Image (cartoon, helix red, strand yellow):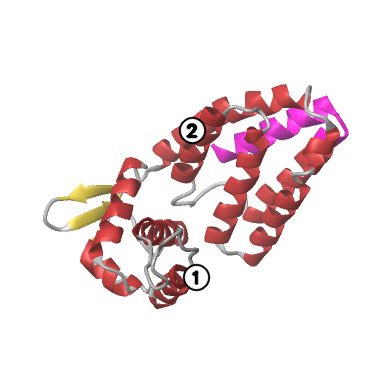
């Protein structure tokens, strides 16, 4: 079984868990189980994005729990969520295998994302006021900084945040949730596509065109951005 270098992530999970807000009436030293599960899930998703959890490898919940400094239970629960996301599959009596995704599957996910997101952005371009688009500029700038850092996990998070905020202007919560799920599944393993800096630059260019209500430019940038995902 592959060894996962997660000592830094274990410390992060411990620090974050210790700083979690308490529910009313909760003992001051009680760590909420659902919060720990969420922290472990975030850590596992980061490990997928960075390649620490490798495609085709099998990982046991107790072993990962030991590295995170938590029991196997929240790890197992987080892994079950990843199984629902299509990121891992259950291997009876052994643990969870990271799903191996081929070029075709990643291309299919990118195509579905484009079919969902591109028409929505083009529709919103004709109705959303410039001031609302301007509110998203800090999120686009976050993706630029994340891309410059070279950290794929950080970029994956900021990229989802930007696209989620973009789609949220539609007022369709179901759309946002479905698109986020597809986005997560399409973010690993990232072996092809434009450099992160190019992808991030397209975010800022798209917002500039949306703010200026330059619809032809928006059309071109949307086609370019989502076409590059495939």
Q: Nearer the viewer, mark 1 or mark 2?
A: 1
Going 78% across and 38% down the picture, which residue do you hit?
133
Up-down relation of residue 52 to residue 182 (above or below)? below
Going 79% across and 36% down the picture, which residue do you hit?
132
Return the disc, 1 or 2, that comes first in the chain's sequence: 1
Task: Name the chief secondary structure element in magenta.
Answer: helix
> Which circle marks residue 226 in the picture?
none
Q: Is residue 216 magenta?
A: yes
State the SS at label 1: loop
Q: Provide residue 29's location: percent of width, then percent of height.
A: 39, 73
> Which circle marks residue 178 in the picture?
2
Going 53% across and 32% down the picture, which residue do you hit?
113
State the SS at label 2: helix
Res. 226 image quadrant: top right
Quote the CA–CA distance across marks 1 and 2.
31 Å
Residues rendered magenta in the picture: 210-230
Q: Provide residue 116's location: percent of width, then percent of height.
A: 56, 27
Residue that badge 1 annotates: 19
Up-down relation of residue 28 to residue 81 (above or below)? below
Indicate the quadrant containing the C terminus: top left, top right, bottom left or bottom right: top right
Indicate the quadrant containing the N terminus: top left, top right, bottom left or bottom right: bottom left
Q: Is residue 139 magenta?
A: no
| Residue farthest along the right direction in this orientation | 212
Going 37% across and 74% down the picture, which residue do you hit?
5
Determine whether label 1 and label 2 are within 8 Å by CB. Answer: no
Q: Provide residue 126's location: percent of width, then percent of height.
A: 79, 22
């Amino acid at each position: 079984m592959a060894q996962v270098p997660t000592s830094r992530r274990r410390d992060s999970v411990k620090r974050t868990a210790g700083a979690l807000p308490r529910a009313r009436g909760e003992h001051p030293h009680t760590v909420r189980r659902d919060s720990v599960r969420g922290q472990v899930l975030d850590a596992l998703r980061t490990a997928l994005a960075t390649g620490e959890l490798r495609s085709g490898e099998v990982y046991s919940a107790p072993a990962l729990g030991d590295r995170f400094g938590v029991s196997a239970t929240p790890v197992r629960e987080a892994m079950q969520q990843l199984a629902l996301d299509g990121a891992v599959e259950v291997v009876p009596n052994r643990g969870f295998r990271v799903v191996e995704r081929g070029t075709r599957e990643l291309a299919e996910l990118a195509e579905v994302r484009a079919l969902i997101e591109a028409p929505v952005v083009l529709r919103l371009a004709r109705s959303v006021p410039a001031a609302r688009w301007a509110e998203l500029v800090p999120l686009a700038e976050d993706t630029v900084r994340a891309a410059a850092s070279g950290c794929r996990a950080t970029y994956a998070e900021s990229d989802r945040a930007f696209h989620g905020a973009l789609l949220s202007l539609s007022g369709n919560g179901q759309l946002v949730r479905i698109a986020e799920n597809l986005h997560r599944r399409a973010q690993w393993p990232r072996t092809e596509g434009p450099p992160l800096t190019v992808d991030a630059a397209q975010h800022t260019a798209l917002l500039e065109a949306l703010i200026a209500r330059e619809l032809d430019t928006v059309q071109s940038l949307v086609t370019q951005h989502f076409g590059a995902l495939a």
